[in-house]
Image (cartoon, rainbow, N blue to C red):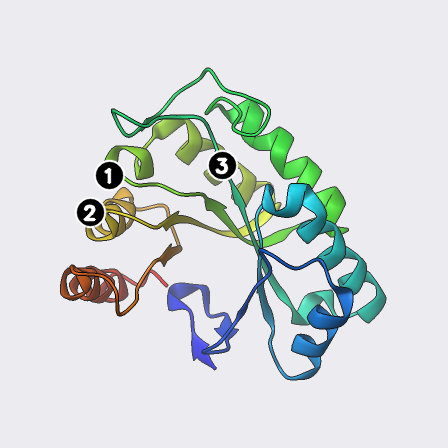
Amino acid sequence: YRTLGRTKLRVPVVSFGVMNSDSPDLIKRALDMGVNHLDTAHVYLRGNSERVIGEVLQKSGNRDKIYVATKMRFARDRQKNVFILRGTEREPGASEENLFKQLETSLQRLRTDYIDILYLHSCYSSQMAAYEPLMNALVKAKKQGKARFIGVTTHSNEPDVIRASVDAGIYDVVLAAYNFAQNHRDEVKKAIKYAVSKGVG
């Protein structure tokens, strides 16, 4: 287990990304083996990932011992790498109203009244990480107690997104792709060190 930055959450070195499984038995097994961090998203398996996690957590009675992270995804202009207000059902427009709509649905599915880590999902530019309407909405969700901690996820252009997220000054956590296939792995590593130096998990 390691401490996740200033959150003080003690999470396992290997956590469970519940993206492609809606098996309650698999989730229970992970919890029994000491995994205490489940990572999902509003859109995974059309919401079934969150639903199954909610069922397992309710039956286990261990909600306060399990850290649940979920992610909110919004419409974006893929040429300009920015969020946009005009969206679709799968990718709603990037507004505070739509963030809270998704959040309320996720809370119902997860059968909880708070998320441990609420992420702005799949940012691939510094502008996306620093998009004020969604940053303000995340801060509001945190102040309301619906999210204990807030963060950003990134799967491309990671060094810039990590640094922009840290410099934004509101995020507690960044979830970033980091693997042996990245040609820019050393740059990602430097950005991670920068995040660590600022207390961002």
Task: Answer left or right for 192 relative to 173.
Answer: left
Image quadrant where residue 78 sits:
top left
Q: Which residue is mark 3?
A: 73
Against 3, is 156 above or below? Answer: above
Where is residue 162 shown, x and y percent of the image? 26, 52
Where is residue 8 shown, x and y percent of the image? 46, 70
In the rendered structure, which disc, 2 or 3, sits on the residue that comes first in sequence? 3
Where is residue 110 shown, x and y percent of the image? 72, 51
Q: Which residue is drawn at the image coordinates 64% and 47% (left, top)?
A: 45
Q: Which residue is mark 2?
A: 160
Against 24, is 139 above or below? Answer: above
Q: Is residue 112 visible?
A: no
Q: Secondary structure at mark 2?
A: helix
Q: Which residue is drawn at the image coordinates 61% and 52% (left, top)?
A: 115
Against 165, is 26 above or below? Answer: below
The three-letter amino acid code for the residue at tag 1 is Ser
- Local crowd at mark 2 within 10 Å, few (<14), some, or many (≥20)? some
Q: Secondary structure at mark 1?
A: helix
Mark number for residue 126? Answer: 1
2 and 3 marks in contact (CB < 8 Å): no
- Give the alpha-carbon distance from disc 1 to disc 3, as whole Å: 16 Å
- Give the alpha-carbon distance from disc 1 to disc 2, as whole Å: 6 Å
- Local crowd at mark 1 within 10 Å, few (<14), some, or many (≥20)? many
The three-letter amino acid code for the residue at tag 3 is Arg
